[in-house]
Amino acid sequence: MTVVSVPSPRRLTEKEQIFHDGLTEHLLWALPIAMLELLSRPSCALEQQRKASAAAVGGRGDAIQFHSKKRTAEAGQQLDLGLAYLAISTPGGITRFGVHACAAPHDNCPADAGSPNQLESTT
């Protein structure tokens, strides 16, 4: 299991860049934990988690960017779990929000020690 930072384009405004950088830093810490949590669950529970994450992020995802006392923590946790689900269930993992996460080594993985894209690893 690997989670690494990858280069991403600069954002249009300083505020957007600050948000993106904060999200990247959060995911570098949170995704390995969420991936381990999901890997410890029975496979039948993963489909339920996928649905719950999709509904929460789809319905309350704006709370991640525009903080809400009641919704931000839940939406953020569901984003973490949803991305973790994708990382462990998608061959080759995922690359989103300045982070690459995968469950197993694969061709052209940004976590490859020889890759010029590897910035930081939390495996």
Image (cartoon, helix red, strand yellow):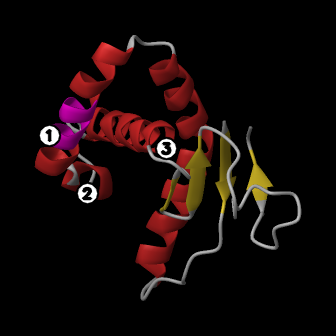
Which residue is denoted by mark 2 in the rendering? 66
Disc 2 and disc 1: Cα gap in Å? Answer: 18 Å
Q: State the residue lying farthest toward the left.
A: 59
- Indicate the position of residue 97 as horizontal and vertical percent values: 48, 63
N-terminal label among 2 and 1: 1
Horizontal relation, residue 94 to residue 110: left or right: left
Label 3 sits on what residue type?
Ala
Q: Any mark on residue 87, and which?
A: 3
Relative depth, front residue between 52 and 59: 52
Q: For the residue carrying disc 2, how many other residues have a C-alpha within 10 Å: few (<14), some (14-19), or many (20+)?
A: few
Horizontal relation, residue 86 to residue 102: left or right: left
Please tell me whether mark 1 or mark 3 is closer to you in this view: 3
Which element type, helix, strand or loop, lies under badge 3?
Answer: helix
Relative depth, front residue between 91 and 17: 91
Which residue is denoted by mark 1 in the rendering? 55
- Indicate the position of residue 121 as horizontal and vertical percent values: 76, 49
Q: Residue at x 75, y 71 (%)?
A: 117
- Indicate the position of residue 104 as horizontal and vertical percent values: 65, 39
Q: Residue at x 80, y 57 (%)?
A: 112
Question: Can residue 113 be spotted in the picture?
Answer: yes
Which element type, helix, strand or loop, lies under badge 1?
Answer: helix
Position of residue 121 relative to residue 15, above or below, is above
| Magenta part, dominant SS | helix
N-terminal label among 1 and 3: 1
